[in-house]
Image (spheres, rainbow, N blue to C red):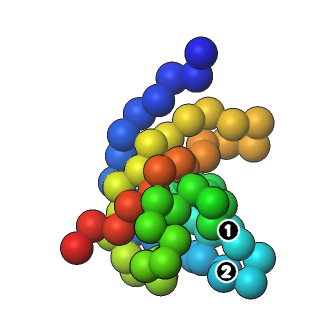
Amino acid sequence: MDEVQEDKGVVRTYDTFKGFGFIRREKGRDVFFYYDDIEDQEQGLIVGDLVKFEVRKAAKGPRGYKVVRID
């Protein structure tokens, strides 16, 4: 089973048309995420949002799941 870690970061890029983006973490590699990984899709995300998320290893690097904006 994949190791799951919880982390926080800032949305570095997010392309709503393509449906994916990257989150910059304080430590470690940036994390890739898809639109479907955003918990509150109606609220959405914009560049600069502070978020919390789960990180799992993926074929091309860390992947973010259950991405939630922190107010």
Residue 13, by quadrant, is: bottom right
Left or right of 50: which side holds 25? Answer: right
Which residue occupies the foreground of this view, 27 or 20? 20
**Circle 1 — which element?**
strand
Which residue occupies the foreground of this view, 53 or 57? 53
Percent of width and height locating residue 2: 58, 22
Q: List the residue tagged with mark 1.
A: 20
Would residue 24 be visible to someone looking at this image?
Answer: no
Seen as rendered, the residue at the extreme top is 1
Residue 37, by quadrant, is: bottom right
State how far apart marks 2 and 1 are (Cα).
Answer: 6 Å
Residue 15: assigned label: 2
Which residue occupies the foreground of this view, 37 or 56? 37
Q: Decide: is 22 above or below 1.
A: below
**Amino acid type shown at disc 2:** Asp
Would residue 46 be visible to someone looking at this image?
Answer: yes
Which residue corresponds to the image point at 77% horizontal and 76% vertical from the top-left? 18
Which residue corresponds to the image point at 41% horizontal and 50% vertical from the top-left? 53
Left or right of 71: which side holds 30? Answer: right
Seen as rendered, the residue at the extreme left is 71
Seen as rendered, the residue at the extreme front is 42
Q: Do tag 2 and tag 1 residues touch (Cβ < 8 Å)?
A: yes
Q: Decide: is 70 above or below 15.
A: above
**Amino acid type shown at disc 1:** Phe
Percent of width and height locating residue 48: 40, 80
- Classify the position of the N terminus by image quarter: top right
